[in-house]
Amino acid sequence: MSETFVRWDAPARLYAALAHLDLGRDAASLFDVSRPRAPWVPALLQAYRAAPGRLLLHGIGLMRPHDLLVCLREDPPSGLRDEAGRALCRAAARAVDALAQTPIDYGLVPDDILEPLHRLRAGLWERHGGPPPLVVADCPALGWAGRAASADGQRVIAVALARPSAHVLCQIVHEDTHAVTDPVVRASWSAEGPARDTAVGAAGYARHVELETAAVEVGEALFQARAPQWLHAYHQWRARF
């Protein structure tokens, strides 16, 4: 089992761009009211709302961290290759460019989470052949949130390492847990149902809640079995839900 902690500027700036967008009551919102109003925000917000595949934007930087701008401009993932998706990618690329000179306040790796992270991941993946390698990207604009993707046989998870270490541990494990629980939940869905949607009140919002609930509940059982000394911290973390 291996965990690597990295600093990738382009993905960090993409999340910083998304943190400028006031999405209202949306579980995917990273909105930070303290960020200055930037001239590119209205166009990015309009493009984001118009693109059916907009949620893919949250993971694209984790799958293509080293050529993110090329990906956004020339080679978006399949769910963003329609006209609205390409418009969103172009707007996101312009935003990342605009933030190119903005300093990124990276955090430090919290050493106290490394041993419990090993134990928790071993328990999570023990019925799936063992845990895949883990890459954790420090993306300060995520705040209290996290994002994850699977790429090149690895789990790639983004969190803000400057947050308290207990939160960082719980958030990393939660994002990792989705890789185990999401396929089980999705297998129970009817093909005729709505697509998952993170906007409160949308037709697919119940599916988003179902995915999150499964990951949170399995996470609690995991902490109780493999890292009970961190269970109180997990209870505090899950209180957000």
Image (cartoon, rainbow, N blue to C red):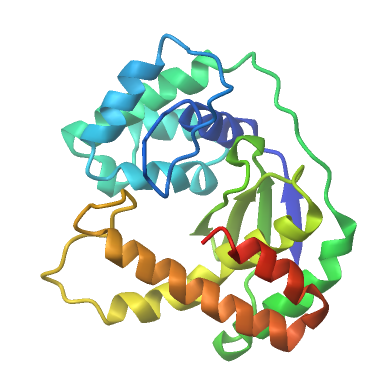
Residue under the image location 40 percent in, 30 percent down: 22
Quarter-of-image position of residue 131: bottom right
Q: Is residue 119 left or right of residue 11?
A: right
Q: Is residue 141 left or right of residue 199?
A: right
Residues 207 and 40: in front is: 207
Name of the residue lying farthest toward the top: 39
- Disc tally is 0
Residue under the image location 74 percent in, 46 percent down: 163
Determine whether 129 is above or below 182 in the image. Answer: below
Name of the residue lying farthest toward the left: 192
Residues 177 and 64: in front is: 177
Q: Is residue 133 left or right of residue 19?
A: right
Residues 98 and 34: in front is: 34
Q: Is residue 8 left or right of residue 184?
A: right
Query: Where's residue 44, x and y in %?
Result: 35, 23
Residues 27 and 15: in front is: 27
Residue 1 visible from this viewpoint: no
Determine whether 209 is above or below 28 in the image. Answer: below
Image quarter hosting the N terminus: bottom right
Query: Where's residue 88, x and y in %?
Result: 30, 30
Query: Where's residue 21, x and y in %?
Result: 42, 28
Determine whether 106 is above or below 44 in the image. Answer: below
Determine whether 160 is above or below 115 in the image. Answer: above
Query: Where's residue 32, x and y in %?
Result: 54, 30
Residue under the image location 45 percent in, 20 percent down: 95
Name of the residue lying farthest toward the right: 111
Residue under the image location 75 percent in, 72 percent down: 232
